Amino acid sequence: MKFKLQILRDDDVIFEMPLSHSDWEREKLKNALEMMETNFLRYSKIFNALSNKTRLMMMKQLLERKNRVITFTDFMRKLELNPKLVWENTRKLRDGGLIVKIGRGRYRCSKFGETSFMMMSLVLRQLLESQEEFESF
């Protein structure tokens, strides 16, 4: 059984990749790994931004809001954080491109942030569960 990831737009496959290295053509795998190395800094900023429970909870707070906007004070109150922690974590989320500051003490989830968060936290969870199920066969 082959395990692969597909991204669809409506019913059209716009991206597909095998999730087992043995299912890759050797040259395509080599190119994909080289691209990973080329994009390492970009990836590390995203992973760094989302590798912390506080930042995940901050992103969750933003995504639960209809307008995807929250204030510094709301972060402090809703997540019971001190100002220093809010400042440090919003900086890392901004560095990763996940949120943007839109005014004094106001933050908005970027479109990139929304899709990155969805992929990294929700899709990755589903992929890991599917991989574990696939390995048990």
Image (tube, rainbow, N blue to C red):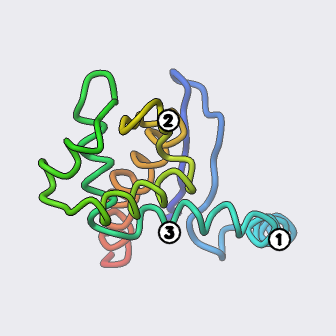
Residue at image position (59%, 63%) is 45
Q: Which residue is mark 2?
A: 110
Q: Which residue is mark 1?
A: 34
Q: Nearer the viewer, residue 23 or 54?
A: 54
Image-based side of 15 in relation to 56, left or right: right
Residue at image position (13%, 48%) is 78
Q: Secondary structure at mark 2?
A: loop
- Badge 1 density bin: few <14, some 14–19, many ≥20, Cα 10 Å: few
Q: Earlier in the sequence, mark 2 or mark 1?
A: 1
Q: Nearer the viewer, residue 81 or 25?
A: 81
- Badge 3 density bin: few <14, some 14–19, many ≥20, Cα 10 Å: some
Q: Which residue is mark 3?
A: 48
Name the mark on residue 92.
Answer: none
Q: Quadrant of residue 42?
A: bottom right
Residue at image position (58%, 71%) is 20
Q: Amino acid at mark 1?
A: Glu
Q: CA distance from mark 1 to mark 3?
A: 21 Å
Q: CA distance from mark 3 to mark 2?
A: 17 Å
Q: CA distance from mark 2 to mark 1?
A: 28 Å
Q: Amino acid at mark 3?
A: Asn
Q: Secondary structure at mark 1?
A: helix
Residue at image position (54%, 39%) is 112
82 in relation to 66, above or below = below
Whether pointer 3 and pointer 2 mark residues with C-beta atoms closer than 8 Å, the reply is: no
Q: Earlier in the sequence, mark 1 or mark 3?
A: 1
